Every structure is written in C-alpha cells, then in structure tokens.
Image: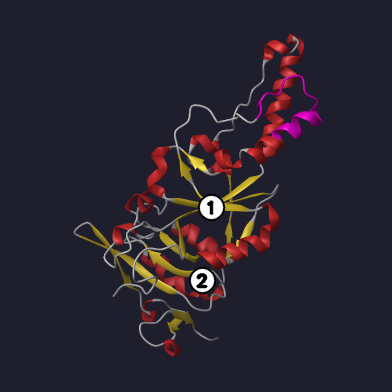
C-alpha cells in the first residue's frame, strides 16, 4: 500500500529533505529544522568564499597584507552569516506511475544524504513550511528553486567588484551591495553537475544558529529501506514528544529497480495509533497520554 501523499503524482505541494537517522532524531527531538551555514554545504562553489577583486598594483606594497586581511574579514562578515535550508522537489512527470520523479524516490539522494538508504526523507507541506520560515525570519528571507549553470566568473556587469583603496566602512558597504545585487548567482545557482537534485532552498542572514518549527508543516516521514530497527522502535515516541498531531509514515521499497513505498502501521510504531476519525487509509497520531 502506497502513501496518500499526493497519490496522483508530482506537483509543487511538497518539499522533501533527506537526512540520517541521527539527523531525524535531532529534528524530532527539537521539533525544529536547523538552517546550515554555507561553509557546511558540499558544493565548493558555495562552501568556499569568493575571492573578489583586489588590485594589489593600485595599493602600496606595505599596505597589501592589511588590505587582504581586511577584505577577507569583510567578505566573511557579509557572506558568512548566510544560513540555508535545502530541499528537493518533485519532477515533472504527473502520471500516477511516475514514481521515479517523486521527491522521495531519489536513489542518489538516499545514498548521498540519506546515509546510504539508512536514513529518512521528510515530507513537508511547502506552503505551511514557507509561512513558518517567513514568520521566523521576517523580510530577510528569500526562497526559490536553484538554477544550474557553469560559470568561469560571476556576472558583475552592473558594477565593478573591486575593493581597491577602500576604507573599512566603504569596503563593508560595497560587499553588502554586491551581496544584495547578485544574491541569485551567489545563493541560488550551482554548477550543472548538481542539476539532478532539483533543489529548492530558503536563505536568510543571521549571525547565530537559526531554526524553524516543523510541527505544523511535517506531513510525512519515509524511512530508507535499511532504516535501523532500533531507530524505528523509538520513532513513534519521538513524534509524540515533538507534539506532531498527525503524520504519515512509510518505508521505501525497491523492486526490480523501481521505487515505491509501503505504509508503516501503528502496531510497528509504539506511541502512535491510527487516526480512525479520518477513514481509510489514514495518517497516524500520537497515543493520548
């Protein structure tokens, strides 16, 4: 039996996030999703800071070390506060049998982000998750799909990206202007090698760790085919402690290379019970204490 999550196929209702068993445990324990710093991403284009223009020929030799140090500190300050939450989306095949295009059916994502099929895929209602992030971030948040393009250099055609002979304040202001003017290229563009991820992300700027509640937006959890039984034994209790009212739980099934899901019943998830008021098939809800 497959899950009820958008049974007619692909669309834009959901966002999907793959994680390890420990990652899922942490999210449920906190009831919150933590944004990552850019330097923790796996794409060198994003993980390593850009080296913007510093024309040393225009600076006295004795001032070059200070200018380089000041530029590095400024770039870290302006760009290093970026926090990102990364998800994957559905494909374009809208047929009921188009399981290869589903957000939860990504074999490479299971291998790379789902701890080699031992982790889980979280299924979020996109509209409710976006609303929760906007409420938490305010106007500093931007979101959207990632574009994929290979570039030797970023396009600074609307203005120079040079930091010659600037004071500390001027350098900081120039870096901030560059970040604001070229945010799409800096934060929503990756090399084409990553295009199969179909990524959708949220970006905000915060000096400290940033988290958002997932209690109202988490619709389902799909367990990898090798999800540890010891983790499944405590999953229901973790969902109850996270104060999630209703949820669907499934597990991946790969048959003849084709992805599918099967429902995990309440009798296999201590702490949860069938939501009988909703009819069949049903999501699960925490057992009343």
* Picture quadrant where residue 264 is located: bottom left
Front tag of 1 and 2: 1
Q: Name the one closer to the observer, 234 or 155.
A: 155
Q: Residue 14 placed where, x, y %? A: 46, 64
Q: Name the one closer to the observer, 181 or 250.
A: 181
- Farthest left residue? 256
Residue at 39% across / 66% down in the picture? Answer: 222
Check the image and report above or below for 49 versus 121: above
Q: Which residue is mark 2?
A: 238
Residue at 67% across / 43% down in the picture? Answer: 81
Check the image and report above or below for 114 versus 49: below
Q: Name the one closer to the observer, 3 or 18.
A: 3
Image quadrant where one finds the N terminus: bottom left
Task: Please indicate whether residue 245 sits to the left or right of residue 164 in the image.
Answer: left
Specify start and end residues of the magenta stretch as a single range: 159-175
Q: Which residue is mark 1?
A: 144
Check the image and report above or below for 221 versus 75: below
Q: Earlier in the sequence, mark 1 or mark 2?
A: 1
């Amino acid at each position: 039996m497959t899950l009820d999550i958008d049974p007619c196929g692909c669309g834009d209702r959901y966002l999907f996030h793959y994680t390890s068993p420990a990652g899922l445990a942490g999210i449920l324990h906190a009831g919150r999703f933590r944004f990552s710093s850019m330097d923790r991403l796996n794409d060198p284009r994003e993980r390593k800071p850009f080296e913007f223009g510093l024309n040393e020929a225009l600076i006295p030799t004795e001032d070059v070390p200070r200018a380089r140090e000041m530029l590095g500190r400024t770039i870290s300050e302006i760009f290093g506060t970026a926090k990102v939450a990364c998800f994957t989306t559905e494909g374009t095949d809208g047929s009921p049998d188009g399981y290869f295009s589903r957000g939860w059916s990504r074999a490479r994502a299971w291998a790379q982000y789902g701890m080699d099929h031992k982790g889980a895929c979280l299924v979020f209602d996109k509209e409710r998750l976006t609303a929760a992030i906007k409420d938490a971030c305010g106007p500093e948040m931007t979101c959207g799909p990632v574009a994929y393009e290979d570039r030797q250099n970023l396009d600074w055609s609307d203005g120079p990206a040079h930091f010659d002979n600037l004071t500390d304040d001027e350098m900081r202001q120039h870096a901030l202007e560059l970040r604001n003017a070229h945010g799409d290229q800096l934060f929503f563009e990756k090399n084409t090698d990553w295009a199969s991820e179909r990524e959708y992300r949220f970006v905000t700027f915060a000096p400290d760790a940033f988290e958002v509640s997932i209690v109202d937006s988490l619709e389902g959890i799909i367990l990898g085919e090798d999800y540890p039984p010891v983790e499944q034994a405590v999953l229901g209790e973790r969902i109850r402690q996270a104060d999630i009212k209703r949820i669907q739980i499934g597990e991946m099934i790969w048959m003849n290379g084709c992805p599918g899901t099967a429902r995990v019943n309440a009798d296999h998830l201590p702490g949860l019970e069938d939501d009988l008021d909703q009819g069949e098939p049903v999501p699960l809800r925490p057992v009343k204490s």
